[in-house]
Image (tube, rainbow, N blue to C red):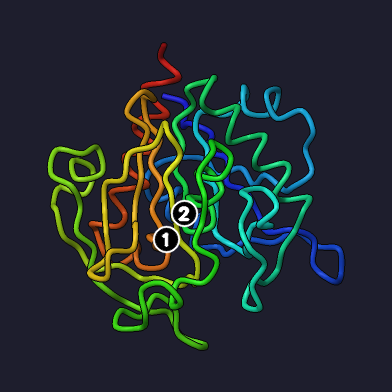
Amino acid sequence: MNRPWIGITTYGRDEKKRFSLQAVYVDAIRRAGGLAVLIPPGELQAGELLSRLDALIFAGGGDIDPLYYGGPQHATIYSVDRERDESEIRMAREVVGLRLPTLGICRGTQLINVALGGTLIAHLPDVVGEVVSHRLPNLDAEHSVSVTSGSRLAMILSQQTCNVVSSHHQAIQKAAPSLQVVAHAPDGTIEAVEMPEHPWLVGVQWHPELSAATDGTQQRLFNALVTAAIEQSRR
């Protein structure tokens, strides 16, 4: 059987005009049996590109420009990349119509939510405090997550609670109308959403790729995405 092609969005252009992405995303897809295809920002023909893939991952990265969701500017907002925002918003809307299996990770989850009409919290500590550390200086934070029973995510993870690796200062404020909230952190922060009317669209606020090599629970997200991609290609 041909292995499915799994697109992964990359970071925007750096000061040396290079696109990049952490290798752990690719590693997780390869462990799951997929072929990783890196997708840099700026592609205008999103539909043509996505029609050649079997699934897509919206990767993490910098903050989304608040202009896209009518949010306030904040001193902590960083690494805004309009080229990346615009191309990924187009792709997020396309995957709904194409019914392409899709996984959002951290920024990727926020991007999906914004593209479909949701909003974000500009700076999470301003709203939920710092009892739960979602981001630490020069260190990935860890905390627990509770997943809704009966949700697609709970079935994928095979459990309703898990420990996750986290690195973010923003999160979903209001979920887009087509998305269902299916996980929370102990402080009430929205940690995951999914689209009930889509064959396979899940977004998690944490970073499963950072621990998937040693945590089978987190690797299941990538395994399930590749399985969904194989099933999609058979239709």
How crowded is the residue under tag 1: few (<14 C-alpha within 10 Å), some, or many (20+)? many
Marked residue nearer the N-terminal end (1 or 2): 2
Q: Which residue lies furthest to the top in this view?
A: 235
Structural distance between the alpha carbons of marks 1 and 2? 9 Å
Number of marks in the rendered image: 2
- Residue 167: x percent and y percent? 46, 72
Q: With 19 as the anchor, is 108 left or right in this view?
A: left
Q: Residue furthest bottom?
A: 137
Position of the N terminus, as image quadrant, is top left
- Residue 118: x percent and y percent? 50, 44
- Residue 104: x percent and y percent? 47, 47
Q: Mark 1 points at which residue?
A: 209
Q: In this view, does 92 lie above or below 113?
A: above
Please tell me the numbered disc located at residue 55.
none
Q: Which residue is at 67% across, 48% downward? A: 68
- Residue 224: x percent and y percent? 31, 39
How crowded is the residue under tag 2: few (<14 C-alpha within 10 Å), some, or many (20+)? many
SS type, badge 2? strand
Q: Mark 2 points at which residue?
A: 105
Q: Do the residues labelled 1 and 2 touch (CB within 8 Å)?
A: yes
Q: Which residue is at 37% across, 33% downward? A: 195
